Image (cartoon, rainbow, N blue to C red):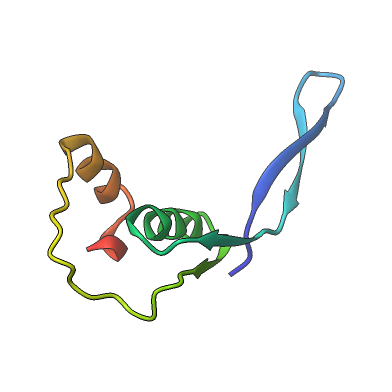
Amino acid sequence: MAARLRVCFEYDKRGSSVAETVLLNIALVGGGIGGLTAAIALQAQGHEVTVYEQASGYARVGADVNLTPNTVRALDGLGPAVA
């Protein structure tokens, strides 16, 4: 899947932006809630994303995670990939 980012370099005589498509490969360091959420959002936009995490695996640690209503709405906006 090719990544697309519109980058404006200049404007034409009518004031319309002249844009170019740029392909991006993105590396994220940290596979926690923030890193994985960012990866899902970036992939949904078509970017190629690699997540680097030092832990060898994910396991329950006995911690509680509280998600506020705004956070839940933001995660819902990412689609079923976060379910």
Q: Residue furthest top?
A: 14
From the viewer's perspective, tell me whether residue 3 is left or right of residue 22: left
Q: Is residue 77 above or below residue 24?
A: above
- Residue 25: x %, y % from top left: 65, 63
Give whichever of 14, 64 is nearer the camera. Answer: 64
Q: Residue at x 29, y 75 (%)?
A: 58
Say which quarter of the image contains residue 40. bottom left
Q: Is residue 70 above or below residue 80?
A: above
Q: Residue at x 68, y 43 (%)?
A: 6
Q: Is residue 9 above or below residue 4?
A: above
- Residue 28: x %, y % from top left: 53, 60
- Residue 63: x %, y % from top left: 15, 59
Q: Is residue 55 above or below residue 66?
A: below
Give whichever of 9, 41 is nearer the camera. Answer: 41
Q: Residue at x 62, y 60 (%)?
A: 3
From the viewer's perspective, tell me whether residue 50 is left or right of residue 76: right
From the viewer's perspective, tell me whether residue 80 is left or right of residue 6: left
Check the picture and name the quadrant holding the N terminus: bottom right
Q: Residue at x 75, y 25 (%)?
A: 16
